[in-house]
C-alpha cells in the first residue's frame, strides 16, 4: 500500500464517513478523544477502513492473512463454532456471522493530519478528486413506535426463573438481555451515529457498514487487546446513573463502589476472564492489575477491572481469541451453561450484539471492543434494533435490573427520539 497525508482541517468526520459509505464494507473505530484521558491501557486509535471485497475467513481462522491490516467483527454466535452450542432464536437483522476485510483505503488519524493508505493505483490526486464529489446526508429520522420484545411483567418472570437456576447451582451469574425494535423505520445512519457520539462519546465507539446493514456502536468496553506478547481484557460489571451535581455524583460513585451485589458481579467475571486468559498464558503471568476501577462516563459510572497475561509460546492469535470469546461480561458463569440459558430465555438472536468489533495489525497485534450500547439498522428492511441487559445473580431484584436496562438504553433512545415524539410499547 502507498501512503500520503491529508490535513484534518480540510475535512470532518461526516465528510469522511459520507465518502466511505460508497463502499460495501466500512469499519470506523472512534475513541472520541478518550485516548487523551485516563482510560486504563489506552483506547484504540481513530481509524477508518473501507473495501468492496471481504475475506471468506473470520478472525478465528488460522489461515487469516498475516502481515496485513484486517478489520471487521466477530458475531456472538461464533460461539457455536467454539463450543457445542446452537442458536435458533428470531434473527430479523441477519447480519453475517463474521466479517473480515483487508482495507482498500485505510485512514489513521494523527494529531494534525490523517495518514491515508491506498493500493498502488491510489494517490493523493485520485483521492482529492473523488472526495469532494460525495454529497453529505441530511435526512431526518422517522420512527413512530419503538417496541419491546419482552414486557416488564414477562421480564420479571424470566429473572425469577434465572434466580432459580442460580439457586440450583446451574449458574451463579447470567447476563440476560432484551430487544427494543422498530419496523418501517427510517434513520440516516451517519447523522445518527455522529449524534450518538455527541450524546454518548465512548472510548470504543464504532461505525460498521455491511452492504445495507449498519451497526452504530457506543461501547465503553474492551474485550481483548494484544500488544506484543501481552494480552489485556477489561470487563465492565457495575453500572449506576451519574448524579446531577458534584455532591450527588460523588454519592452515586460511592454507592456503586460499596454495593455488595455489584462487587460480587464484577469479581465473578474477573475470575472467569482470568481463567479464559490463563488458557493462553505463560504459567504465573496472569494477573489482575486493577480491580473495581471506577470510571465516569457522560451518563453512568462504570466499574471496570483489568486482567493481563503474557502469551505462552506456540499459542496463535486465533487460539487466544477462541479461549476468551464470547466475553464473560456478556455471558455469565460458568460460561457454557450461561450461554445455553441465554438461548433458552432470550427471544432474539444476538447476532453482532455482544460480539466484538476490531482489527489485526500487520505486526499481529489486535484490539477488539464489546458490542454493547449499539443501534443496528437494516436499510433494506427499514428495521432497527438494539439490545440491553444486566447481570442476574441470586440477589437480583427484577425491578432494579429492568431499570438498569432502561438506563443503558437512554443514549440510543435520545438519538432516536430527541423530542420524545415516538412512543415505546410492548410487542
Image (cartoon, helix red, strand yellow):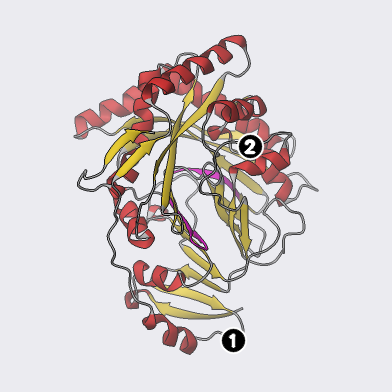
The image's mark for residue 87 is 2
The image's mark for residue 121 is 1
Identified at 37% across, 62% down, the residue is 190
Q: Are marks 2 and 1 in contact (CB under 8 Å)?
A: no
**Is residue 390 found left or right of 146 in the rendered image?**
right
SS at mark 2 in the image:
loop
Assess whether residue 216 is covered by the magenta stretch.
yes
Viewer-nearest residue: 232 or 423: 423
Which-is-in-front pick, marks 2 and 1?
Answer: 2
- Image x and y of residue 180, in percent: 40, 39
Q: Hey, which quadrant is residue 243 in on the image?
A: top left
- Image x and y of residue 116, in percent: 50, 76
Assess whether residue 28 is covered by the magenta stretch.
no
**Is residue 180 found left or right of 273 in the rendered image?**
left
Viewer-nearest residue: 9 or 14: 14
Viewer-nearest residue: 20 or 41: 20
Q: Which residues are magenta?
A: 209-225
- Image x and y of residue 294, in percent: 39, 34
- Can see residue 39? yes
Image: 365 above or below 413: below
Q: Hey, which quadrant is residue 414 in on the image?
A: top left
Identified at 51% across, 71% down, the residue is 23
Q: Mark 1 Cα within 10 Å, few/some/many (few <14, many 20+)?
A: few
**Is residue 223 found left or right of 318 in the rendered image?**
left
Give the Cα distance between marks 2 and 1.
Answer: 43 Å
Image quadrant holding the N terminus, namely bottom right
Magenta stretch, overall SS: strand
**Is residue 352 found left or right of 38 in the rendered image?**
right
Image: 397 above or below 418: above
- Can see residue 295? no
- Image x and y of residue 103, in percent: 58, 70
Amino acid at each position: 500500500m502507498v501512503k500520503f497525508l491529508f490535513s484534518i482541517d480540510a475535512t470532518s468526520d461526516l465528510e469522511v464517513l459520507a465518502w466511505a459509505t460508497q463502499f460495501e464494507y466500512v469499519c470506523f473505530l472512534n475513541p472520541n478523544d478518550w485516548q487523551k484521558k485516563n482510560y486504563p491501557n489506552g483506547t484504540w486509535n481513530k481509524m477508518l477502513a473501507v473495501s468492496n471485497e471481504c475475506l471468506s475467513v473470520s478472525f478465528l481462522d488460522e489461515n487469516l492473512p498475516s502481515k496485513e491490516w484486517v478489520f471487521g467483527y466477530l458475531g456472538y454466535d461464533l460461539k457455536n463454532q467454539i463450543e457445542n452450542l446452537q442458536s435458533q432464536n428470531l434473527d430479523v437483522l441477519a447480519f453475517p456471522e463474521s466479517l473480515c476485510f483487508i482495507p482498500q483505503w485505510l485512514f489513521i488519524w494523527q494529531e494534525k493530519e490523517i495518514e491515508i493508505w491506498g493500493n498502488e493505483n491510489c494517490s493523493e490526486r485520485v483521492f482529492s478528486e473523488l472526495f469532494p464529489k460525495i454529497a453529505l446526508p441530511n435526512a431526518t429520522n422517522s420512527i413512530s413506535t419503538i417496541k419491546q420484545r419482552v414486557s416488564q411483567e414477562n421480564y420479571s418472570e424470566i429473572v425469577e426463573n434465572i434466580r432459580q437456576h442460580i439457586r440450583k447451582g446451574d449458574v451463579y451469574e447470567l447476563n440476560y438481555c432484551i430487544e427494543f425494535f422498530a419496523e418501517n423505520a427510517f434513520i440516516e445512519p451517519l447523522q445518527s451515529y455522529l449524534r450518538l457520539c455527541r450524546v454518548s462519546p465512548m472510548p470504543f465507539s464504532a461505525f460498521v457498514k455491511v452492504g445495507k446493514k449498519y451497526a452504530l456502536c457506543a461501547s465503553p468496553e474492551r474485550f481483548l487487546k494484544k500488544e506484543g506478547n501481552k494480552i489485556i481484557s477489561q470487563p465492565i460489571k457495575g453500572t449506576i446513573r451519574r448524579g446531577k451535581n458534584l455532591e450527588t455524583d460523588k454519592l452515586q460513585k460511592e454507592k456503586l463502589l460499596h454495593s455488595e451485589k455489584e462487587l460480587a458481579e464484577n469479581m465473578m467475571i474477573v475470575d472467569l476472564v482470568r481463567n479464559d486468559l490463563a488458557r493462553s498464558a505463560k504459567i504465573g503471568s496472569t494477573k489482575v492489575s486493577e480491580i473495581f476501577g471506577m470510571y465516569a462516563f457522560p451518563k453512568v459510572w462504570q466499574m471496570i477491572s483489568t486482567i493481563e497475561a503474557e502469551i505462552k509460546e506456540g499459542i496463535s492469535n486465533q487460539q487466544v481469541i477462541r479461549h476468551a470469546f464470547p466475553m464473560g461480561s456478556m455471558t455469565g458463569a460458568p460460561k457454557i451453561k450461561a450461554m445455553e440459558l441465554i438461548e433458552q430465555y432470550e427471544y432474539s438472536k444476538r447476532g453482532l450484539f455482544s460480539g466484538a468489533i476490531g482489527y489485526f495489525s500487520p505486526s499481529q497485534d489486535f484490539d477488539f471492543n464489546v458490542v454493547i450500547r449499539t443501534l443496528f439498522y437494516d436499510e433494506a428492511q427499514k428495521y432497527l434494533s438494539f439490545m440491553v441487559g444486566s447481570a442476574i445473580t441470586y440477589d437480583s431484584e427484577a425491578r432494579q435490573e429492568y431499570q438498569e436496562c432502561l438506563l443503558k438504553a437512554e443514549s440510543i433512545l435520545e438519538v432516536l427520539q430527541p423530542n420524545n415524539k415516538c412512543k415505546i410499547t410492548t410487542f
